[in-house]
Every structure is written in structure tokens, then in C-alpha cells.
């Protein structure tokens, strides 16, 4: 279980990006973070694996506080948190198979990692995962020759190769067409169910969130304004999440597209 | 400017508009013209005061023709043998190859330190500053400096050439590294991958084409340098024979032959680099 408690993040002197953010995400469930652009969705996601350093609060993954971890511990924790991105962030000249195998790099010694030495078991597993996301025929294709939806599926396989407890998805479908969106979202929901993963997704498409999420975290101006099961989300809640904010209070958020 | 608005009684109509002089000459253009004019004056002055040493121009051009035809129309091995010259040529190519490979290997690791997206700013900046300093001094001078330390010979040539190659390649490599998208690096960082595995598994595969291209360009430069350095450091390569034939024995036939040999190697290198680049382009499409 992921528990975020009283997370605060300030940019500059008094520009609040996150204010007392509290929520939990359960294994086996898809949790969607929704909110207007610049509300702090990306900041929350990146704070969880500490790509962004927050100011105060607690982030407990299975009762271990990620914020207290030292450098080596953080690497170990990060290895069990998969992450997929809007722009897939694969190494484009490498093949799909090689990119999936990158999911194992975090578990290797420096030398083995530098040389890219993978065991046969790992290679077999990578092929299996590509099959699971429906890309068995593309294993030896360079990633820049794959479509966006296919690249995102390679990204998911790479995350799975980490044997993650949790997968963070930063706008995973923002660059995809409706058909690829459906494939990717179906895979993510299935993973949550079958592998009992915590799936945490930043979304700006409310309809997708309503269709796929079990749990919704609504955020506006860096503050949680709603958290609860998707069935509790109605028009009033959405209006509250997406209400216009005074521009003088608008929050600055790093990496928000 | 008042055409469309209602004329108001208390506004004084401006008198008939004066045509204003509009100048198209901007400041930079003025400076450029000044510089060109200055250069023109200097040229006129130096031509007027040229010491022609009572040279007969027709005769001078005639002997130039004779010498050029001796060089390029009647090349021969002179007092050295084909075997000797070819071996010297191989020495030059080896010198270029060795220094480029050594330089590339060392430069890659230093370039990691000099890349702003991988290393702290102070480290990257100081490495770049030192490398810029080394680069500013020509290769030949470095070879001469190392000749003082190590004595004339091949080792001074190797160390001097490598030294300058490293400085050159660090700049090229670190800039290539800086061009790798930060996102892909971050993706691996987010999965707990350490620094060196990221460098070798993510950055290196992304920039191999650029590295190959730069390294090959440096190989061509090093070949030219090896020829020049051979004479200076006495490394017994083709440059030494060129120097001896041209400045010591005045055997222009041999000079011509050596120039043709060098030209041949340069063409072969160019063909190889074109092939390499073609191969790379095909890969990316």
C-alpha cells in the first residue's frame, strides 16, 4: 500500500506546488490523479520516487518511508517502482528487447550493468513480457520504428521487468490515439488485477479516469480536493476539481506539460 | 496620423511633413565597411612597397612550372626505395590510428565528466576550460614539448598527438552526450539504475553514430598531423622522408611521389568515412 501523508512542496519563496497532500493507493487498484494543468499532478508522481525532492511529509510504500532513504536505499526502492512516461522515454536506437531488459539494470552490479550482461532467464522473461503486451513479433525492432502505442507497451514491459510493487504512470496516454489508449489502459488495469500492483496514473482525460480508475484523487492548486472511489465522483465533484483558480494563486509546477 | 479622427479645434495641425532621411546602414554594416576599407588600404600600401628582389616574373613562373612538372609529372622514389617509403607510410597511418584510438578511449571518460547533464557544473566547466587551453596550442607544439621531455622519436609523437586528440574529442564527445534527451536518462534513474550503467547502456548507444563520426574526423586530422609531426619529432614516418626529400636532397621527383601517396591515403580515408556515414544513415531511417 502506498500512503502519502502531509506532503508539501514549495518552489521559490511562497509558490506552493503541493500543500498537505494526503492519499492512499491500494494494490490491485488503479488510482487516477486528475486535476487541471499545473495543479501539481506531475509533482506528486515525481515526489513519490523522489525524482523531485519535496519539502516535508511522509511517503510510505509498504510502511517504508521513501523520503528517509539514503542514496543506496533509494536506488533499491526505485528499482521496485516502475515508471512510464508520456513520451515513453525509451532508448530509441536499441531494440524493444534491449529496452525491456533495461528494467533489470537497477538490480545489477555496476560492472554487469555497464556491460549489459543479462542471464538467459532474464532474456526469456523479457520475451515473455513482450508477449504479454502483445509485441512478441517486434522484439528485435529498433524502438524508433515502433508506433507510439507500441513504444508505450515496451515501456510497460520495461517497468514490469523491474518486478515492481507499484507503477507510476505520468500521462501515459496523452500522446496516443484512442485505439492505442484503450490497449494501454486495458493492460494497466489487467496488471493491477492480476499482479496486485499499485497503479498510480496522472490523467487529464476525465472520461478515461472514470472508465478505468477504481479510485480517484482530485487535485486543484496543489491541494487535494477529492479522494474516494470512482463511483463517488459526480458533476459537483468534477466542478470542484476543475474550478477556475485565481491566477494570483496559481501554482508553479515543474515538468508539467 | 489624424486622417481618420475628427479634427479637434484646439489641436494645431502640423505643417507639411518633412521627408526624413532614412538610413539603411546599420552600425554593424558601418563597422564592416570600415574594416574592408582598412584592409584595402593596407593591401595597396604593401603592394606599393613590396620588395621584389629584382625578380624576373616570367623566369620565376617558368621555374615554378619546371619544379611542379618534376614533382607531379615525373614522380619517382629518388634515393629511397619503394619498400622504405611504403613502410614509412604505414608508420604514419599506424601513428594516426594509435593516437586516435588511445585519444578516443581516454576522451570518452573525461567527456562524461565534462558533460553538463551528467556532472556537477563546476567539474564540467573546469574540464572544459582545461581542454580548451590544450586545444588552443597546436598539436605540433605539444609534440615538440614532449620531445623535450621524452627525447625526439616516435614516443614523443604518440604522446603529443594523443594529448591534443583527447582535448579535441572531449569537446566533441561531451557535446554529443549533452544532446541525449534528459528524459531517457531520467527513466532509467527512476528505476534505480546507477551512474555508469546509465552511461554505457543508455547514453553510449544513443550517441555511437556521433562518436564514430567525430572519431573518424579526428583520425583524418591525426593522419595529417602525423605527417607533419614525423619531420619534427623524427618519428621515421613519411613526413620525415618528405622533409628530407624536399629540404635536404631537393629531390622534387620524390616529393611528388610522396604527395601522391598521401593523396591516395586521404582518398581512401574519405571513402571509408563516407561508407561509415552511409551505413549509419541507413540505420536511422
Image (cartoon, coloured by chain):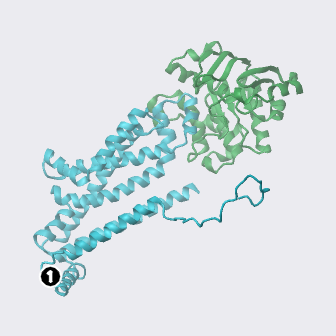
Q: Is residue A48 above or below residue A88?
A: above
B8 relative to A102 in the view: left or right: right
Question: Is residue B209 visible in the rendered structure shown here?
Answer: yes
Tell which chain the image draws in green: A
Identify residue for label 1: B55
Chain displayed in cyan: B
Q: In the picture provided, is B123 more to the left or to the right than A164?
A: left
The residue at the point 60 percent across, 37 percent down is A100
Task: Point out the residue furthest to the left here.
Answer: B248
Q: Quadrant of residue B13?
A: bottom right
Q: Residue B44's spot in the image, x, y percent?
A: 27, 74
**Quadrant of the image occupied by residue B110:** top left
Q: In which chain is the residue bearing label 1?
A: B
Please state which of residues B58 and A72 is positioned toward the viewer in this rendering. Answer: B58
Residue A15 shown left or right of residue B198 in the figure = right
Q: Residue drawn at (34%, 59%), measured in percent from left and top?
A: B220
Residue positioned most to the right: A235
The quarter of the rendered structure image containing the N terminus of chain B is bottom right
Q: Give the side of residue A152 with respect to residue B172, left or right.
A: right
Viewer-closest of B212 and A216? A216
x%, y% of residue A197?
71, 24
Amino acid at each position: 500500500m502506498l500512503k502519502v501523508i502531509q506532503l508539501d512542496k514549495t518552489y521559490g519563496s511562497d509558490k506552493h506546488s503541493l500543500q498537505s497532500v494526503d492519499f492512499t493507493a491500494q494494490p490491485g487498484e488503479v488510482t487516477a490523479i486528475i486535476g487541471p494543468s499545473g495543479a501539481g499532478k506531475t509533482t506528486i508522481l515525481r515526489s513519490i520516487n523522489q525524482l523531485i525532492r519535496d519539502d516535508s511529509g511522509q511517503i510510505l510504500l509498504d510502511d517504508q518511508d521513501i523520503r528517509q532513504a539514503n542514496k543506496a536505499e533509494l536506488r533499491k526502492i526505485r528499482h521496485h517502482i516502475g515508471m512510464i512516461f508520456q513520451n515513453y522515454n525509451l532508448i530509441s536506437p536499441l531494440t524493444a528487447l534491449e529496452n525491456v531488459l533495461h528494467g533489470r539494470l537497477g538490480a545489477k552490479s555496476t560492472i554487469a550493468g555497464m556491460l549489459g550482461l543479462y542471464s538467459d532467464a532474464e532474456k526469456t522473461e523479457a520475451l515473455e513480457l513482450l508477449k504479454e503486451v502483445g509485441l512478441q513479433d517486434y522484439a528485435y525492432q529498433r524502438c524508433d520504428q515502433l508506433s507510439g502505442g507500441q513504444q508505450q507497451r515496451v515501456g510497460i514491459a520495461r517497468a514490469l521487468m523491474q518486478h515492481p510493487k507499484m507503477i507510476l504512470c505520468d500521462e501515459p496516454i496523452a500522446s496516443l490515439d484512442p485505439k492505442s489508449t484503450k490497449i494501454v489502459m486495458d493492460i494497466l488495469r489487467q496488471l493491477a488485477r492480476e499482479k496486485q500492483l499499485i497503479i498510480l496514473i496522472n490523467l487529464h482525460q476525465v472520461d478515461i479516469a472514470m472508465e478505468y480508475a477504481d479510485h480517484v484523487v482530485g487535485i486543484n492548486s496543489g491541494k487535494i480536493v477529492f479522494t474516494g472511489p470512482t463511483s463517488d465522483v459526480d458533476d459537483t465533484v468534477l466542478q470542484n476539481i476543475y474550478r477556475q483558480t485565481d491566477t494570483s494563486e496559481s501554482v508553479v509546477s515543474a515538468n508539467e506539460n | 496620423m489624424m486622417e481618420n479622427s475628427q479634427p479637434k479645434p484646439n489641436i494645431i495641425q502640423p505643417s507639411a511633413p518633412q521627408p526624413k532621411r532614412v538610413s539603411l546602414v546599420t552600425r554593424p554594416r558601418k563597422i564592416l565597411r570600415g574594416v574592408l576599407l582598412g584592409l584595402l588600404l593596407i593591401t595597396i600600401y604593401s603592394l606599393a612597397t613590396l620588395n621584389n628582389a629584382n625578380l624576373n616574373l616570367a623566369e620565376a613562373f617558368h621555374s615554378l612550372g619546371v619544379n611542379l612538372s618534376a614533382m607531379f609529372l615525373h614522380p619517382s622514389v629518388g634515393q629511397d626505395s619503394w619498400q622504405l617509403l611504403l613502410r614509412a607510410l604505414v608508420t604514419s597511418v599506424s601513428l594516426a590510428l594509435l593516437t586516435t584510438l588511445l585519444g578516443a578511449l581516454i576522451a570518452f571518460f573525461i567527456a562524461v565528466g565534462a558533460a553538463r547533464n551528467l556532472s556537477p557544473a563546476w567539474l564540467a566547466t573546469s574540464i572544459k576550460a582545461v581542454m580548451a587551453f590544450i586545444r588552443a596550442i597546436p598539436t605540433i607544439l605539444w609534440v615538440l614539448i614532449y620531445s623535450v621531455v621524452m627525447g625526439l622519436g616516435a614516443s614523443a609523437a604518440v604522446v603529443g598527438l594523443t594529448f591534443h586528440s583527447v582535448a579535441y574529442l572531449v569537446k566533441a564527445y561531451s557535446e554529443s552526450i549533452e544532446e541525449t534527451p534528459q528524459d531517457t536518462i531520467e527513466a532509467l534513474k527512476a528505476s534505480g539504475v546507477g551512474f555508469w550503467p546509465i552511461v554505457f547502456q543508455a547514453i553510449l548507444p544513443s550517441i555511437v553514430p556521433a562518436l564514430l563520426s567525430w572519431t573518424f574526423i579526428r583520425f583524418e586530422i591525426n593522419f595529417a598531423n602525423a605527417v607533419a609531426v614525423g619531420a619534427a619529432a623524427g618519428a621515421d614516418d613519411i613526413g620525415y622522408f618528405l622533409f628530407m626529400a624536399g629540404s635536404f636532397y631537393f629531390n622534387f621527383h620524390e616529393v611528388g611521389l610522396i604527395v601522391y601517396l598521401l593523396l591516395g591515403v586521404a582518398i581512401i580515408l574519405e571513402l571509408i568515412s563516407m561508407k561509415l556515414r552511409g551505413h549509419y544513415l541507413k540505420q536511422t531511417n
